[in-house]
Amino acid sequence: MGHIRVTDLGKAYKQYPTRWSRLAEWLIPFSPMRHRQHWVLQDVNFEIAPGEAVGIVGVNGAGKSTLLKMITGTTQPTCGRIQLEGRVAALLELGMGFHPDFTGRQNAVMAGQLLGMQVEEIEALMPDIERFAEIGEAIDHPVRTYSSGMQMRLAFSVATARRPDILIVDEALSVGDAYFQHKSFDRIRSFRKAGTTLLIVSHDRSAIQSICDSAILLEGGRMAMHDKPEAVMDYYNALLAEREGQTVRQETLAGGQVQTVSGTGEAGILSVRLLDERERSIEAAEVGQPVVLEVQVEIRQDIERLVLGFMIKDRLGQAMYGINTHRQNQALEDLHAGERITYRFAFIMGLGKGNYSVALSLSRLDSHLDRNFEWRDYGLVFHIINNRQEDFVGYSWLGAKTSITRHAENLVERAP
Amino acid sequence: MLLSLYRSLRSYRGFILGSVKREFQARYRNSLFGALWTVLNPLSMIVVYTVIFSHIMRARLPGVDDGMAYSVYLCAGLLTWGLFSEITLRSQNMFLENANLLKKISFPRICLPVIVLLNAGINFAIIIGLFLGFLLITGRWPGMALLAMLPLLALQVLFCAGLGMILGVLNVFFRDVGQFFAICLQFWFWLTPIVYPLSILPEWVQRLLQLNPLTNLIGSYQNLFLYGQWPVWNSLLPTLVIGVLFCVIGLRVFRRRVGEMVDEL
């Protein structure tokens, strides 16, 4: 249960030159094809094992929604096959089919029926739905009086009232308040633990990286990549910055990580080193140790402005700290071909134990999306060990200085 | 194929019945008189026609010199025509009206025409119930012949459902179909002996109207309610053949285009 296999999947929309040509094609027997096929998705192949979680990323129009619609069955594929095992639930358009004049309870029943449930089943699930939605009395008021957040709560609660074998989520989760977002994400996680296969479309890097086992990148209706989430997200980010003349290159490093380098190349990074107090290059740093991140940059063509930024990421790709010279008011201007620049960022290593990587970017402005000279993931990989500080948990070392005062018992006032 | 359609209908029976109930409720939810409006609408039409034709224009049914008889004749035709026009008009828009649902949610599409049929059936049941009550009170109860209404209705629903399905699917691809059929229906109404009796027409026009598959069907209802006559089953054979043909074509068109339909909505 929960197996998904997609083979040679493709979707094309028919485009007729005029409205009459469709009629002609329908009515005239043996008439030639009068429509052009506009392919929005082609050659998609993947297999998802039961219980796996897969993220789908891609720019708008890459075919993500079309793919999900075909998997849920609302749209039929033009070619290829989709094999699904088990019950599918889709959180595509939450609140679809809600009738404003009916109460939340009636609409919940209706939504359940649309999922193919019988009234008795829904009635049995109703207490759970009410409890999860937490909209209180409003459940018996017409939906037109609901806020969009309340509608979304109810819709989510109905759609996930039963654990499906396959759950398909399309960014619907970005609706609702922070509390409910957490709650719904927890429910998805618990489904996943219980063996539900997950398929998530999202632009949220941390959502994909924290929950998915792998990710699929769609680009122009084709599968550009199917790999570990970090690698796909790095490539995707680089792709976002891609412009004419830019190249995107990926290499697998010794540690198994995939390094993505992209950019137009007017400036490039020569070396990245982490230095200790005595200017020695190190691969492991101590918690609380003063270190210097040294970056050497080469200017290959004259450019008017240069900003270097770096970001330290943990092994899941979550950003720990990032800064650039623009934000530090130290952007360089009027650079000439052949120049070499050495940047030194000195700081106290305040991160917790673990593996970290450094991503770097050379750009004209604050964002690398404007002019991306070079973007480099995994520019440096280092470890943090903790021999000097007390053993603590978490990603950041705040170095609490503790003072404790014990008060004598007679100083505490007690009520008679 | 029919079996798989039946199976999906069965598993979605909750949705179908729920939708029918909700549509009925939704129509009257915010109105004071509720279901009364279902009755008032055709009733007003009947009053208007009766007053104009029977009292102002002094039209009499040949052989019957009774103003009330004309009303019964009118009702028999008008109410059953109402069922026909409701099913076909609703069917031709059923996919367009539910475009959002079709695009976003995966459910057996065959549910939609079934919902239309059931809804029209309920409305018809209400009004025909009142009509029967009226016949009982005025002493015009048609007697045993009333049983003939069931096969007549079955035939009519078959005819309407097939035609409606064809129109519904075509209307998604060619919106002209909806406009065209609405005009068609106007002509069709006056080319069917509902307001006037067939016998007042010249011989050659009568023969022409025989080509209209609804002429004999509506005529059977009229004879049934007015004179308590059993239908002449043979005369309904062409209607049955056309109805079956519509259904076969309708299901074929539906099956072939149901996937493409979502792309067009």
Image (tube, rainbow, N blue to C red):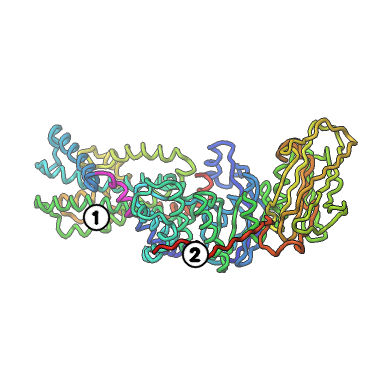
- As helix, strand or loop, the secondary structure at mark 1 comes to loop
Q: Nearer the viewer, residue B204 or A287?
A: A287
Q: Position of residue A338 (x, y in %)?
A: 90, 36
Q: Residue shown at 48%/40% (left/top)?
A: B174
- Is A142 situated above or below B148? above
Q: Is residue B198 visible?
A: no
Q: Quadrant of the C terminus of chain A?
A: bottom left
Q: What secondary structure predominates along the stretch shown in magenta?
A: helix
- Is B142 situated above or below A334? below
Q: Quadrant of the N terminus of chain A?
A: bottom right
Magenta stretch: includes residue A142? no
Q: Which chain is indicated by disc 1?
A: B
Q: Which residue is mark 2?
A: A410
Q: Are marks 2 and 1 in contact (CB under 8 Å)?
A: no
Q: Residues within 10 Å of mark 1 (few under 14, many from 20)?
A: few
Amino acid under label 1? Val
Q: Nearer the viewer, residue B155 or A235?
A: A235
Q: Position of residue A306 (x, y in %)?
A: 79, 36
- Is B165 situated above or below A113? above
- Residue A216: quadrant of the picture: bottom right
Magenta stretch: includes residue B21? yes
Q: Is residue A187 left or right of residue A248?
A: left
Give the spatial CA distance, label 2 vs label 1.
110 Å
Magenta highlight range: B19-31
Q: Which chain is indicated by disc 2?
A: A
Q: Which residue is mark 1?
A: B232
Nearest to viewer (mark 2 / mark 1): 2
Q: Position of residue A265 (x, y in %)?
A: 82, 40
